[in-house]
Amino acid sequence: MNRISVLLLCITTLAIFFIINKKEDIDLSQYRDTIKELQQQVEELEQINDSLELIEQELETKISSYDKTINNLNRQLDVIKIETEAKLKAVDNLDVSELEWFFTNRYRYSQDTIN
């Protein structure tokens, strides 16, 4: 009887082992196709990203150039403002006779022709 118990125990153990380790066959082709599609989309997006990075670099270069131009124009405006203020101050400091002389020489009028 001991042999029969051991034999039944072995058969039961093997049956339990096969039941537990039984794997269901899963169709992986569907998942592989989805993975391939996703990989293609990732590659396309990486290409788009690369082209956008190039555009970004071009725009940054243009912005830098525009900034330099703007700075140069602002400096020129500052010089013009300073020169204009200096000329206005010079005119404010002139007395009446100096103003008459300036406008007479500038427009070629004399006091005789005005009368």
Image: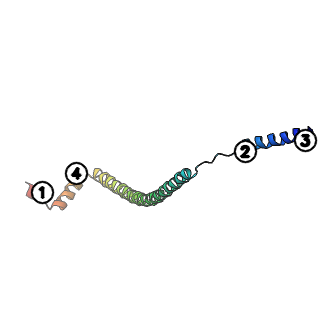
For the point 18% across and 61% down, the residue is: 105
The colour scheme used to paint the residues is rainbow
Q: To which residue does mark 1 refer?
A: 111
| Residue 21 badge | 2
Q: Are marks 2 and 3 in contact (CB under 8 Å)?
A: no
Front-most of 70 and 57? 57
Q: Which badge, 4 or 2, comes first in the chain's sequence?
A: 2
Separation of marks 4 and 1 at Cα, in angstroms: 14 Å
* Quadrant (top left/top right/bottom left/bottom right) for the N terminus: top right
From the viewer's side, name the closer residue of 25 and 51. 25
Q: Identify the secondary structure beneath mark 2.
A: helix
> Residue 13, position in %: x, y?
81, 41
Element on which disc 1 rests? helix
What amino acid is at disc 3?
A: Arg
Which residue in the structure is indicated by mark 3? 3
Q: How far apart are the two marked residues, 1 and 2, measured between alpha carbons? A: 123 Å
Q: How far apart are labels 1 and 3 at the CA level?
A: 148 Å
Asked if disc 1 and disc 3 are in contact, CB closer than 8 Å, the reply is no
Question: Taking 37 as reference, is 67 left or right?
Answer: left
The amino acid on which the numbered mark 4 sits, given as a three-letter code, is Val
Q: Are marks 1 and 2 in contact (CB under 8 Å)?
A: no
Residue indicated by mark 4: 96
Residue at the far right in the pictured view: 2
Q: Amino acid at mark 1?
A: Gln
Q: Could you tell me residue 15's position as x and y percent? A: 76, 42
- Decide which of tag 1 and tag 3 comes sooner along the chain: 3
